[in-house]
Amino acid sequence: MTKYLKYISFVALFLASIFLVACQNQNSQTKERTRKQRPKDELVVSMGAKLPHEFDPKDRYGIHNEGNITHSTLLKRSPELDIKGELAKKYKISKDGLTWSFDLNDDFKFSNGEPVTADDVKFTYDMLKADGKAWDLTFIKNVEVVGKNQVNIHLTEAHSTFTAQLTEIPIVPKKYYNDKYKSNPIGSGPYMVKEYKAGEQAIFVRNPYWHGKKPYFKKWTWVLLDENTALAALESGDVDMIYATPELASKKVKGTRLLDIASNDVRGLSLPYVKKGVVKNSPDGYPVGNDVTSDPAIRKALTIGLNRQKVLDTVLNGYGKPAYSIIDRTPFWNPKTAIKDNKVAKAKQLLTKAGWKEQADGSRKKGNLKAEFDLYYPTNDQLRANLAVEVAEQANALGINIKLKASNWDEMATKSHDSALLYAGGRHHAQQFYESHYPSLAGKGWTNITFYNNPTVTKYLDKAMTSPDLDKANKYWKLAQWDGKTGASTLGDLPNVWLVSLNHTYIGDKRINVGKQGVHSHGHDWSLLTNIAEWTWDESAK
């Protein structure tokens, strides 16, 4: 795909030189591969150039269910998305939904040999609630330690998505947690972190105090490489399993196979919902508002005018599906919001009617205001870079000029309320949908970054969240998307323009059995690894 810019850092170029022989004449023909000498029960993987969240729940470690690799959560999701006990051997919920009681297993130990207790659970939840950035725990009234292995969590009101936090938040040791925790994490999962060098690699070994079945692989290493360098390392035998971007997924490497796994991992544009000056003070101090993206006609034109199938075919090589929300094809999704797109003529007509007049060069203006806005994307994510280029090209045909801004996540945080981001999302529950649209969460971390606010939608969100009955909750989630008149969706307010749902694609040694993989959530990097304790090596599969 020559029209897409390639961003390769100096470090990546240096690493690529190590694998120069493997890189030569790279094309679709099958490459020879000889695995570098190492025991069968040791693996080397590369799932990207960055290790997200770095083992600290304060940095959202666990948000993609990766916490169960090195830590324990109170509850856990099966590949079929059923909820079952993890650290909690059993739990019960009061009839009013306000008290959740947990009986903890007494054989869970941290990697230093000390037991996991109710005090550690209380500390973890209290600490994250007080921090208030990574997790929304404002609905928790208090955490009560009943005994060494018993804990009650009292809520201010019923919270229908509480299982989201219970299956994602890793329990950390009260005695050893500090500001440097990510450099020396102590958890109670099947693996422990032996060494972590930020920007280079993380080495995992079996937790000798793990209560469950001993994992097959005694050691595995995640080397932090960009996707092109990772492919070269796979071909040379230095790496056993890699994440492959859709444009690399068709590469043939002898002795490997492609894993093509469905996900609800979506990509799209976040569009600031309010005009400049409407919000004077954001909780995070960043500027709020955009006079172009706040116009419903701009958001609607992009929603109906962009061609999602073309985006899918061009950028993802067909590995995925068109997307219309962050909760497509879930029990709480409103299928009415799956609209027909690629309506270029209708989109142009809509813009003209709204006062965005077409100029001689094809661009549009409303008075002195140009139909243009900045779109930020991280340079270390090639897929988002490619998506940004394709979307800008399609938007240009509508008369909307999207100015691409190659950036990083630190800068993007400061621009998230007044500029568009090439955004992502998608989890196995409605929590993220709630957080993305609830007004009181605006400007508080990566939640309602667009400052979306619709009182009718808020009413439905409140009813969905506080319903003790799951079916009733799902009814209100759907109404929040579209009730026939308004909603936070393609048919309503359009605070985001969702484009595609990715398939997660990996290339790995045929002899690696990755166990049962469910539908992945957002985050290709950790998703495949969440069950690595169940992976095995099958020599006969060579």
Image: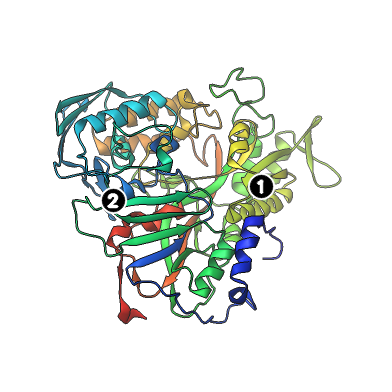
Residue bearing mark 2: 81
Amino acid type assigned to the residue bearing label 1 in the image:
Lys
Q: Position of residue 464 (x, y in %)?
A: 33, 32
Q: Position of residue 170 (x, y in %)?
A: 32, 40
User: In the structure shown, which secondary structural element does the residue marked by tag 2 occupy?
Assistant: loop
Q: CA distance from mark 1 to mark 2?
A: 40 Å
Which residue is the extreme one toward the top? 280
Q: On screen, 469 above or below 33?
A: above
Q: On screen, 386 above or below 349?
A: below
Amino acid type assigned to the residue bearing label 2 in the image:
Leu
Q: On screen, 341 above or below 261?
A: above
Residue bearing mark 1: 346
Q: Position of residue 49 (x, y in %)?
A: 54, 54
Query: In the image, what residue occupies the spot 30% across and 75% down?
Result: 538
User: In the structure shown, which secondary structural element does the residue marked by tag 1 occupy?
Assistant: helix
Quadrant assignment, res 95: top left
Query: In the image, what residue occupies the spot 65% across and 78% down?
Result: 25
Please tell me how many numbered marks the rendered image carries.
Answer: 2
